[in-house]
Image (tube, rainbow, N blue to C red):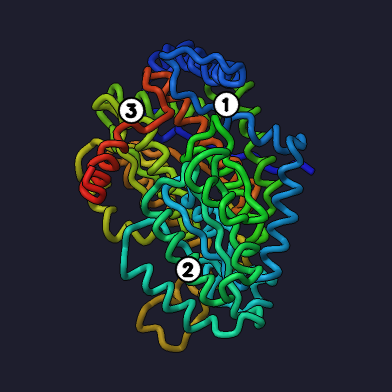
Amino acid sequence: MSYPPISYDPSAARVLIDDSTWNELGPSLLKARDEVFADIELMHSGSIPDEKKPLDAGFIDLPQRLLAGEANLLDQIEESAANFAEQVDRMVLLGIGGSYMGLRALFEALCDRYHNELPRHARNEIPRLSFEGDNLDNDAQRSLLKLLMNESTNSSELSDRWGIVVISKSGGTLETASAFRTYRNALERFYGAGAPETTELVIPITGETGKLRDLSNAIGYPVTFPIPDGVGGRFSVFTAVGLYPAAVLGIDIRLMLQGAADVTEAFRTGELGTNPILDYVATCHLLERDHGMDLRVLSTWGKGLEAAGLWYDQLLAESLGKHERGATPLTVVNTRDLHSRGQQHQEGKRDRVITNLIVDTTTSATLQLPKSEHDQDQLNRIAGKLIPEMMSAAIQGTNEAYASDRRPTADIHLPKLDAYSMGQLLQMFMLGTVLEGRLVGTNPYGQPGVEGYKNAMGRILYGS
């Protein structure tokens, strides 16, 4: 079965980019693409020159390798996730940064907007989801503990049962490690010290070595999943980091991986002008280089993709924000944020390129504006219009307004919001980010600047 591809239309932004400049960039862009794919072979060879380190290109061909059956990992993930989902009614996911943001993007895009409020039968027997370990926020952690205490009083009742998925490659990240200790203790109090659930309902996802791996071995958790070497945290959504909890939520992880694999192949073979990833990077790069537009606004139309935008914020900022360079990402949700940031986008500094992220088909049945005998709001003149028609008018009108003042916009179109399209979208952004890094000479892997605050915080806390 074939699925429609993601598409990218930069035509409204091309008014500021002449054809000769666009075409001149082509050879450099294709050379950078060759380097991106050569990095895979270099990484797998195990002989990485110093100037290439760190090199975490393993995400690029990971979807293809998993679909081909590497280590039977997908079978193992699906079997364990189904077993976990049958035993609990709430999954508490502990992780920070790339260890939770990809899953949050998938959850908000592909699950019901009120998933946690629905009864279990209306969730297709899928557990609720709560995030923690992503901040050192006392009140937030206490609130979740209070919720668990109030909801979970009988460990023999499925509706009361909960379990933990903890994700950390090293196990040394303070936010997640401290939360894991707290919620591990709460789990033991609920099921009873020594109860089988205290180990069976904890799923660590971690590196082959590190503090969480050592802790998992010491406690004896029967099921753990690896985070492979060669895949950095913000590129890890297609490892067990994203795949395992997505499978617990009933998301078709194979279809998602197929979307990622297909967009990777399209990137590898397509040419400038017909290749969404090449065209996206060319547009953003030229507008930044030649017009000083170093603020990249990802304008998501509808609520389901806000978390995907926040995931992309981390991806772009940590990958390219180095050496006093790098564009600043900003996620907005329209039409909501037209009533806040819209003014600045229309008449503020000319320092931004706006990329609209548009879903062409609604997931659920369309709503129609009803006619009313009380027409004080004067909406009877558009009674019968569908909500998607109104959204389409908002997109067209906003783009038209920006274009009238030569403010560049481009459109990414997802045919619909499903696992295949999300696989395409996330892989497109990861590939595009790495491609731009290679184009401008910035190593897109690693995040050395993050270590500064971690070292200072450790000195303050531990006195060393």
Please state the horizontal and vertical placement of residue 195, each as a whole percent of the image.
63, 72
State how far apart marks 3 and 2 are (Cα).
52 Å
- Name the N-terminal-most of marks 1 and 3: 1
- Name the N-terminal-most of marks 2 and 1: 2
Mark 3 secondary-structure assignment: helix
Crowd band around label 2 with a 10 angstrom C-alpha radius: few (<14), some (14–19), many (20+): some
Residue at (70%, 46%) from the top-left corner? Answer: 255
Looking at the image, the residue that sits furthest to the bottom is 373
State how far apart marks 2 and 1 are (Cα).
54 Å
Please give the label number shown on residue 146: none
Please state the horizontal and vertical placement of residue 275, each as a whole percent of the image.
56, 27
Mark 2 secondary-structure assignment: helix
Work out which quarter of the rendered image holds the C terminus and state it.
Answer: top left
Q: Can residue 233 be seen in this view?
A: yes
- Compare residues 73 and 10 and report the one nearer the observer: 73
Q: Mark 2 points at which residue?
A: 185
Work out which quarter of the rendered image holds the N terminus and state it.
Answer: top right
Please state the horizontal and vertical placement of residue 169, each as a whole percent of the image.
50, 42
Crowd band around label 3 with a 10 angstrom C-alpha radius: few (<14), some (14–19), many (20+): many
- Compare residues 226 and 74 and report the one nearer the observer: 226
Q: Name the residue under label 1.
A: 274
- Name the N-terminal-most of marks 3 and 2: 2
Residue at (54%, 35%) from the top-left corner? Answer: 428
